[in-house]
Image: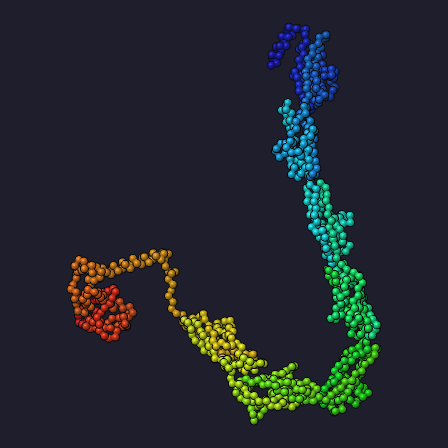
Amino acid sequence: MLQIRDLVWGLLFAGCAAAIQVQITPTQGEISVGESKFFLCEVVGDAKDIDWFAPSGEKILPNRPDIIVSRTDEATATLTIYHANVDSAGIYKCVARSGDKEAQATVQVKIFQKITFDSAPSPQEFNEGDDADIVCDVVSSPPPAIIWKHKGSRIQVAKDVRYKIMDNGHLLIRGIKKIDEGMYNCEARIMARGEIDFRMIKVIVNVLPTIRARLSEVNATADIASSALLACDADGFPEPSVTWTHNNVVLETGDKYTLSDDGSELLIKSVKKVDEGDYTCIAKNKAGEKSEEVSLNVFVRPRITYLNNQTASEFDEQVTLTCEASGDPTPAISWSFQNRVFTEGEQASWTRPDKYESLDRNIVVRSHARVSSLTLKNILFTYAGEYLCTATNSIGRDNKHMYLEVRYAPKILGTVTVYTWEGNAANISCEAEAHPGASVVWSRDGLQLPSANTTNVKVYNTPTISYLEITPDSQYNFGTYNCTATNAMGSESKEFVLIQADVPSSPEIELVEPFSSTAVVSFEEPDSMGGVPIIKYRVEWRLPGQDWTGKEYHADDEMTTITIVGLKPETTYEIKMSAINGKGEGESSPATTFTTQPVLSSETSAPNAVTSAALREPTAPKLVVKVQGRGNTLKVNWIKQDDGGSPIKHYLVRYKAKHVSDWKPEIRVPHNSEYVTLSGLDWNTEYEIHVVAENQQGKSEPGVISYRTASDPTTIPDDAGARSAMGTGAIVGILIVVFFLLLVGVDVTCYFLNKCGLLMCIAVNFCGKAGPGAKSKDMEEGQAAFTKDESKEPIVEVRTEEEQTPNQGGGPTEPNETTPLTGPDGKTVKADGTEGETEVKNATAEVKTVPNEAPQANGNESKA
């Protein structure tokens, strides 16, 4: 290429030796903004100066920073444009001079702008519901066409009015939603150059937080070291942060508060009343913030703050007890004394002053707010004691006691009359109730006791009771005694009487209920006790005309019956009673006659035979056992004995095998039963059986019997398990085939050996032939013979000694009604000893070989 050019220049130089030629390489130039490019100006001829001129016509000087001209040799000059911009465009000219000769050439330099994204940030964030202006600023020359894509598809502005492509190329989304979030493609195109470029822009849609309190109101109790949990749930994008404020103060985790990791829960520790109020839960993110309020209600359990003991004197006009209590809600205050309660209902509403008066108007309750007063009028000594003040509200209660001290003069209590007898010490008690405590003095006829002349009188004192102990030694010691109690409030006296005791009168026998060996005596206690309690009753009985037999019974409270025992059945007795107290035994009641009953049985017992406690336990029943069923079921019968004077309630049966220690569960049988059946017992086991009779008094000794059950009967073993895996039908078929073959074998044997059997019949009847080795129909002597009959075909069975399985020893077989006997003359002998013809129907003849040395019959040998 250079050689051709040199040739051309050589020709031109030769043709015009004096001319100058200029050529610029390249002949035209296109430069992108920011790019650099150089142009070479070549001169043909002897040129002294080579210069470049800018599009403005100015000569380009060497010191310009953006455009540089350099002379590489005498024939070339280079124009270099660095970092071209729009102003660099135009026509550049190269001029060569040599003396007065000049030549020039020009080059058109075009500057164009490539696609450049000035501003297309990613990500770009918007709030949900806002009009989102997605920025994508593109610079190029000529200006580019902008195309927007979302999720791989071109956005069709004409199809969705929410979208609009702005003149500046931005994408406008009206009312942007969360579903609009994602990656958007901003694509720029220059059709003239086929140039394309794009930017991916991430669009984030922030959602304004929403917040909801789990409970709008939270209740807590103060002063019990409890905690309260306030909670709210927040949602939004990005995830909102949650903070809490109270009284415009932001709460933070510390000694008083604890916040969860996401701030949604606020724990208030050791709740106090001052913690009550509204708490604000605030959720905040880039889209904004929302808040919700939670109310904390702090309740305070009641606490009695004031209650003091009081003192009054009997017959004072009044005394007022005051009780104050705190709490929230305001507590209701009530009073109680001993078993008497002044309740909330009686005190009506606490929202206004209220008044409660007792029926006798001596007790008045007034209440207002947190204070209640209890006013007692006309003070009595019985008002003294502990009063309970109770404060109650919806979350708890508190109570506290106070003591009302009432000072009063002595009041003497105690039994006025005391009974005793000579030589028996008696205590007269003088109980003096007083506050403060009283001193007690005993006296008689104005003489203080004890005195030097009364050695049989003693005084014993306790804090509240004084005892005068008197041991009468004469009639003089009986009479009145004076007790005087004195304290600072006053004194009181009381007369006590010591009376001579007497023996009791006789009790009255109302009814005697006789039984076989006992009797129940119903009586009324004596009209007169003699002044002292009855300690015993004596009951005596006898056969008419004989000596009395007696027994003493300790007297119990409200005792009205006595049971005597050891009587004889069907016997008449006389009975009488007397009462005994400390003084002695009183007179006996008139004798009463009764007759005991015979020994009772279940048949003779009347339903109402016993109306009171039984006299003694029954006698053990007698037992009889009978075997039932297959031998392991026993029927146990019993015979009732003496019922002890009271009807049998039931029988108790228990049993066990003798070789074990545990009894079977006890069986209870009704009183009118006479047996019980024990089934399912073990075979060949001895059982011990006990039967007990029980009446109102108790249980009898057991009736005992032992019995052994039968042995286990023989059972047919189950051979099902021994069968082969073959089916039942196959086994039956095999057995039939074997049986048939056996019959055929026997028949063939009979045919060839004894000329008999089915083959023999066929040979005779159809072929007219006898079997091989046939003999005459008359058998030799010693053998059983028969003559064929047209209507009957008897078959005789002859067994050898070896076949007599019941008698292996070879002895004679036990005859029975089915065993024919053969006499010496060959006739059959029946079981009854008579002779008869041998006739066996529907039987199979079986003939066995008899050894030659077998015994002969009638002197003839037996032939096989």
Q: Is residue 313 above or below residue 277?
A: below
Would you identify the image quadrant in which residue 149 lies? top right
Q: How many numbered discs?
A: 0
Q: Residue furthest bottom?
A: 545
How far across and down, in percent of the image, does residue 721 sit? 39, 60
What scheme was used to colour the molecule?
A: rainbow
Q: Residue furthest front?
A: 359
How far across and down, in percent of the image, does residue 446 sit? 82, 87
Residue for point 66% across, 6% down? 17
Please give left or right for residue 631 compared with residue 49 in the image: left
Please give left or right for residue 50 compared with residue 845 in the image: right
Residue for point 56% across, 82% down? 615
Would you identify the image quadrant in which residue 494 lies? bottom right
For the question of whether residue 400 can be seen, the reply is no
How far across and down, in percent of the image, does residue 709 sit? 43, 73
Q: Is residue 615 above or below residue 792?
A: below
Would you identify the image quadrant in which residue 394 lies? bottom right
Please give left or right for residue 422 compared with residue 308 in the image: left
Identify the image quadrant of the N terminus.
top right
Q: Nearer the viewer, residue 94 or 502?
A: 502
Q: Nearer the viewer, residue 307 or 742?
A: 307
Q: Nearer the viewer, residue 58 or 568?
A: 568
Q: Residue furthest left?
A: 776
Identify the image quadrant of the C terminus.
bottom left
Q: Is residue 473 above or below residue 188?
A: below
Residue for point 70% across, 33% down? 133
How far across and down, in percent of the image, does residue 384 sit? 79, 73
For the question of whether residue 513 can be seen, the reply is yes
